[in-house]
Amino acid sequence: MSGELPVLYRVAKRLGCGNEEAEDLVQTCLIKAYRAWDRFDGNHLRSWLIKILRNERLMVLRSHKEALSLEEHEEIEVIQEGFWSELAGKLEVERIIAAMEQLSPAYRMTIHLCDVEELTYEEAAEIMDIPIGTVRSRLSRARQTLRDILLAEAQMEAAR
């Protein structure tokens, strides 16, 4: 389970936590997982832990009367394969991360789980408690929005 700590920390940061808050959230997640270990079916440890982490974060946000605005109705778009390979040689990681910060929380989380953490659509859907079709739709839109942001930045830089 210790191999999952960096993943949990990154997800906590993606959920809007600062460094100390992310550490606290991961610790709470691990305590809850330990207490619920007898109910764990043994499949998809990472997904199970991230779901606990996400639920804990949402509980904290609700208790502070903050709300995440998640888009509920989205249409499925064709997922364009090869998106990351197109960008790999052209842009630095820092630019991609900065561009990801401009995405809505729903898109940012989806792209983080599927493309950064390389979880399956099914695992991401389970973690975010949404249908698989919504994961696919959000991922497609997130990738397109990210592409648009990065291309606009590249064009502005080229014009300088």
Image (tube, grey):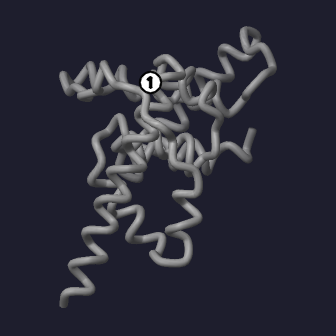
Q: Can the viewer see residue 24 in this picture?
A: no
Q: Residue 123, how many percent across, how many down?
A: 62, 27
Q: Residue furthest top?
A: 39
Camera-side residue: 100 or 74?
74
Label 1 crowd bin: few (<14), some (14–19), many (20+), radius 10 Å: many
Locate the C terminus and report the quarter of the image it occupies: bottom left
Work out whether 28 lies above or below 86.
Answer: above
Name the image quarter holding residue 77.
top left
Camera-side residue: 116 or 76?
76
Give the residue drawn at x 53%, y 67%. 86
Q: Which amino acid does label 1 sit on?
A: Thr
Q: Mark 1 points at which residue?
A: 134
Camera-side residue: 31 or 81?
81
Work out whether 113 lies above or below 37.
Answer: below
Report how many numbered discs are placed on residues in the image: 1
Give the residue drawn at x 48%, y 29%. 135
Q: Residue 64, how many percent across, how many down?
A: 22, 25
